[in-house]
Amino acid sequence: SHFESLYPEATRKNEIAQILKYVSAGKSCQVIGAPGVGKSNCLRLLPYNRALREFHLDKNESRFHFVYMDFSEVSKRPLSDIIKFILISLAGSFGERRLKEEESAVNKFLSEALKFSDEMIFSQNLKKAIDYLANERELNIVFLFDRFEEYVPNIDSAFFLNLKILRNRAKYRFAACFATTRLIEEVLETNIFAEFSEFLLGNTVFLPIYDRSGLDFRFKHLEEVSGKSTDLKTKEEIIKLSGGHGKLARICYET
């Protein structure tokens, strides 16, 4: 199981609620935050923490399927490799959900594409997979693009055109969430993301530096791992001096 599955359901409560509000309406969004505040952690909560999903989505939890992708792994790869990466990530995203029928179908599309190892086949089979999941299985598919800023220097308009094509096929059952340090419209020329702008611009979630629930959990986890603890006053002083910055506060407490 993933570490994010251990977090309490109230972690990043307001920000998760905002993300889900957008994707539930078939809108994509941007998650903006300073380095170290927990953008990756926030995104990984969605696919790996079922209790958190149920807390926010209740009976609709089973209708949503989140696919996490770390774009630092493919930051300098061409678009053909990005499409492969997305299909491979989609195929590998079903294990913890126990969606055996969906997993089998998408793996079949992936195996066929790997057999021919052709860019066009990968692209077509990704479309087939989205068609199947969104239109036949009636799942809301949400792509979670983490560390997207690392891919930005090598991006071109074809990336967003491909997302638009997937969105047009699945309609409101497809959305993408971009975690980055700055707004996409601030770092890219308009013509690059123009094809997807109507589904993305204006839908922004800003991550506060301090998330009490998440930081309390990390402090508690450090205590359990180390077998040591300290008084409440020391914790509060660390939070005060660090501003509650997730990574900085955690390192201070560990030290």
Image (spheres, grey):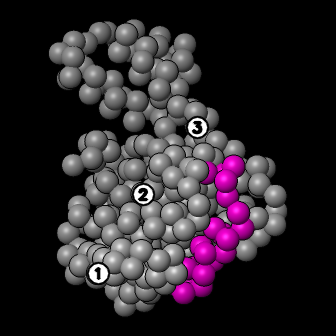
Residue assigned mark 2: 68
Q: Quadrant of the C terminus?
A: top left
Residue at 69 percent of width and 44 percent of height: 182
Would you call the spot at circle 3 few (<14 residues within 10 Å), some (14-19), or many (20 or more)?
A: some
Question: Is residue 140 one of those drawn in magenta?
Answer: no
Of marks 2 and 3, which one's residue comes earlier in the chain? 2
Q: Is residue 75 left or right of residue 114?
A: right
Three-letter code, disc 2:
Tyr
Of marks 1 and 3, which one's residue comes earlier in the chain? 1
Q: Residue 79, image x and y in percent? A: 59, 65
In whole angstroms, how far apart are the C-alphas of marks 2 and 1?
20 Å
Mark 1 vs mark 3: in front: 1
In whole angstroms, how far apart are the C-alphas of marks 1 and 3?
41 Å
Residue assigned mark 1: 108
**Helix, strand or loop status at disc 1:** helix
Q: Is residue 182 above or below residue 211?
A: below
Q: Residue 11, image x and y in percent? A: 40, 43
Q: Nearer the viewer, residue 211 or 168?
A: 168
CB under 8 Å between callouts 2 and 1? Answer: no
Of marks 2 and 1, which one's residue comes earlier in the chain? 2
Where, by quadrant of the figure, is residue 46 drawn? bottom left
**Magenta region, residue range:** 151-174
Mark 2 vs mark 1: in front: 1
- Residue 185 — which label? none
Residue assigned mark 3: 208
**How many numbered marks does the figure carry?**
3
